[in-house]
Each structure stands twice: as C-alpha cells, then as structure tokens.
Image: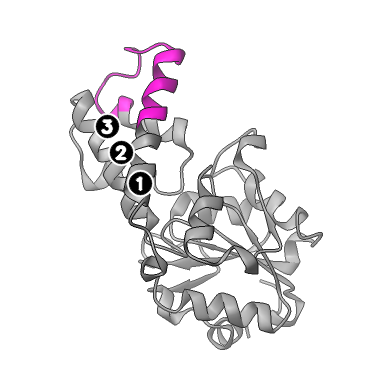
Amino acid sequence: MVKFEQIKGFIFDLDGVIANTSLYHGKAWHQLADELGVTWTEDLANQLKGVARMDSLNLILKAGGKENDYTQAEKEKLAAKKNDNYLGLLDSLSQDDILPGMKEFIEDLSAHHYLISLASSSKNSPIVLKKLDLAKYFDGKVDPATLTHGKPDPEIYTRGAEVLNLKPEECIGLEDAIAGIKSINGAYETSLGIGDPKILNEADINFNDTSEVTLENIKKAMD
C-alpha cells in the first residue's frame, strides 16, 4: 500500500457509500423479482450490490432458473421497468439520505484540495448527486454508458483516475461491495471498504460504517 502523502484523489461509488440509494435499488429489484416469480433472498440482494443493471437482471434470472426464458430485447424492457421503479422511489430522496459523515468528509476533501470523482455503475447518479446537493464537489464522473465491462472489472476505477488526470497509485477508491473492492484493487488503487470486514476482506483499508471515514482515520490506517 502506498503512503498517505502520495494520495491526490478519491474515487467514490455512490450507492451505499455516499447515500442510502442502495435501499432504493434493492426495493426496485425486489419488485421486479416478485413480478418474475423469483424468490428474493438476502444473498441475492448482496450479489447485486455495485453491479451494473443488466448484470443484476441476469443474476436475478439465474437465481430463478429463468436465464434462458427471455430474449435480449425482453431483458432490456425488464431492466427499463426496474429503472422506472427506481426513479419513482427517488422522488422522496433528499439530503437526509446522505450516509452519516459523508457530506462532511466530501467537504473536507474539497477544502484540502483533493480531487474527487464518481465511479458509479448507476446511470442515474447525476440525478442523485443533484438531489443530494453534492454535485458541485465532484471534479469528474465516469459515464457508465461508455464502459465495456462492469464491476468487478477494474475499468470503471481506471477511468475514475483518468478523469482526474491522476495515476492509479495516487487514488483511493471507496466501496461497500466486494465487486467494487475487486474493481479498485484491479485498477491498482488503494481500496477503502465500508462495511463488514469479513465480507470486504480484500480491502486495503476497512471501516465498519461511513461515520468512521475521515482523512485523519485514513491517514492512521495507511501509516
């Protein structure tokens, strides 16, 4: 792991890291799974964290033994239906949905002149950041529509550094899902996991929840 003094930028996942939007995604996928007759389980919900929309749909279909029941066009309609469900749930999103300590952390990064980018697989992330009044702090965003591979492939975090014109070793990526941690590690950046260390055991740094994520605590963990 590099030294803290080498770090110049931070690359954020969105859902479950900055805000509670992961709950909205879960509810929207749960609605669709019920309609498809696929049993919703905690394990399935965890598999979908940090995973792109079509990949998430395929996981749900596979869990129900229905992976060969739909054409690609039908799958795209199902994914669009899930997104409509999600956008409907987002109507109630506000700054109250920002996870504990994250607004203060992002403000502190900006005050200390760190560069900040977003590496979310959600195509709705610009809407979310605007609703949370956090968009102004981000120097760059990865457009998920331009990506060839989803997490755990490192592409999104490689691009997250590129949009900031930084080297991978100058960046810390923040994730709450194992697929995201694998993505950060594959991009040769420092990975910061937020959540159960037994699940996120591949992370370079781990905090149990967002309230622990501060520059001071990160520095201590890297020294």
What residue is rendered at 61% in x and 85% in y?
219
Binning the other alpha carbons within 10 Å of mark 1 as few (below 14), some (14 to 19) or many (20 upward) gives many
Please tell me the numbered disc located at residue 32: 3
> Is residue 38 in view?
no
On the rendered structure, is 137 left or right of 31? right
What is the distance, in whole Å, between disc 2 and disc 3 at their CAs?
Answer: 5 Å
Task: Kindly indicate whether the residue at mark 3 contacts the one at mark 2 (C-beta within 8 angstroms).
Answer: yes
Residue 117 x %, y %: 66, 60
Residue 20 x %, y %: 37, 61
Residue 30 x %, y %: 25, 39
Task: Tell me the residue that label 1 is attached to.
Answer: 25
**At label 3, which amino acid type do we have?**
Leu
Viewer-proximal residue among 157 and 3: 157
Q: Main secondary structure of the magenta part?
A: helix
**At label 2, which amino acid type do we have?**
Trp
In reply to whether residue 78 is colored magenta, the answer given is yes
